[in-house]
Image (cartoon, rainbow, N blue to C red):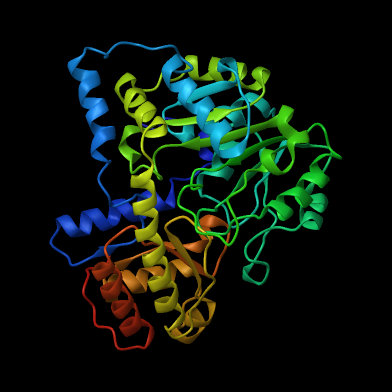
Amino acid sequence: MNLQVSRRVQRVKPSPTLAVTARAARLKAEGHDVIGLGAGEPDFDTPKHIAQAGIDAIRNGFTRYTNVEGTNELKDAIIAKFQRDHGLTYERNQVLVSSGAKQTVYNLCMAVLDPGDEAIIPAPYWVSYPDMVLLADGLPVTPFAGAAQGYKITPRQLATSITPKTRLLLLNSPCNPTGAAYTRTELRALGEVLLEHPRIIIGTDDMYEKIYWGAEPFCSLVSAVPELYNRTVTINGVSKGYAMTGWRIGYCGGPKELITAMSTIQGQSTSNASSISQKAATVALDGDQQCVVEMTRAFKERHDFINAGLNSLPGVSCVPGAGTFYAFADVSKAMASLGCREDSDLAELLLSQGGVAVVPGSGFGAPGHIRLSFACSMQTLEDAVERMRRVLSGAGTPKVAAG
């Protein structure tokens, strides 16, 4: 039987990061020696005091529905965090808690995009942004910023990407997949362009702000351009900085009108985020932040190692990142020397001959690149670099069955 699905869902494709992670897990389960560098997930356990808050919530019977937009307790913690870290002031009706920041971004796309509206998504981009825009009947516009400009678009690129149909800008800093972060001066320059176009709504994805080691303090867009406060939704979550990916808590602050619309959409889809996870997230935001400092220190050490390691490989070039736990490497020269037409061909070679699973850059709007997650042990990274060296130098021997 041929069961027809909607044209809407036919526009989108499965997430390549999830696909690579699932394939690596399957090969490991089959007994193959595979190093999976695809997953965007901290390898640390959730800090004990945060996990204990979840345990206490269960034991105390906090297991029923909450308000769709989140508990007042967690919203107050989010309000305090925005004020403390960015000098941003929000009321409770300007805050929404969702089941992960991915849902937050999706809610925003659904709330502001009408058929034919355009959304500017600087490339390289997180893989899900364009597909979420397509699901909302919008059209992704993806100006590309290469390594020569630090993977960050210029004000001129932004200006030339804007048309009468532009409705939304999604800006991710520090960026998944590149680790690039915009400075306050760079954000101000982009903001000057946006101030000329009052119809454009901005969504800033600050998910990796805590995993950051840039030369100057992290800056969110509205902190640099407060004039954009009334049309910017500042998005964040606890998944990455607090090693809470499975808890599924994202949040945002923004104009009341947009937050209300996003809450309405959420109320007709998933309703509230997990009550137990909300209790844990409250403790994460309100509690001692030393755990974040310690995890970030480890990520920085790994970043320095993998960046140097990748740059030592034949045909590979990698620009240092300012944050996240990803390395984004230009492998176009390696592809040419090995006869690979697509970055997916090189990724397949690394997996089949070296047992290293990476994500092709084409999924991030950057063909000729690969993304590696360094959210794993230094020993694993050392092994991965040496395996990649053997493959890229032509000395690799097949280790993993194809398919």
Is residue 216 placed above or below 205 in the rendered structure? below
Left or right, 155 with respect to 119, comes to right
Quarter where residue 403 is shown = bottom left
Occupied quadrant, residue 373: bottom left
- Vertical relation: 245 (above or below) 27: above
Along the viewing direction, whichever of 400 and 65 lies nearer the viewer: 65
Give the farthest residue toward the right: 196
How many tags in the picture? Answer: 0
Q: Nearer the viewer, residue 294 or 138?
A: 294
Return the x and y of residue 328 as percentages of the image width and height: 49, 65
Taking the view exactly as shown, the residue that stands out farthest to the left is: 31
User: Residue 323: percent from the left, percent from the top?
Assistant: 49, 57
Q: Image point 76% across, 48% down: which residue? A: 188
Residue 150 spot, x, y in % from top left:
63, 66
Q: Is residue 136 visible?
A: yes
Q: Residue at x 26, y 63 (%)?
A: 377
* Residue 36 in the figure: left or right of residue 81: left
Residue placed most toward the observer, 320 or 171 = 320
Residue shown at 39% from the left, 78% from the top: 309
- The answer to whether 72 is drawn above or below residue 186 in the figure is above
- Relative to 88, is 359 on the left or the right? left
Residue 197, relative to residue 347: is it above or below? above
Identify the residue at horizontal 42%, vertical 83% (top origin). Answer: 313
Asked if residue 11 can be seen in this view, the reply is: no
Q: Quadrant of the N terminus?
A: top left
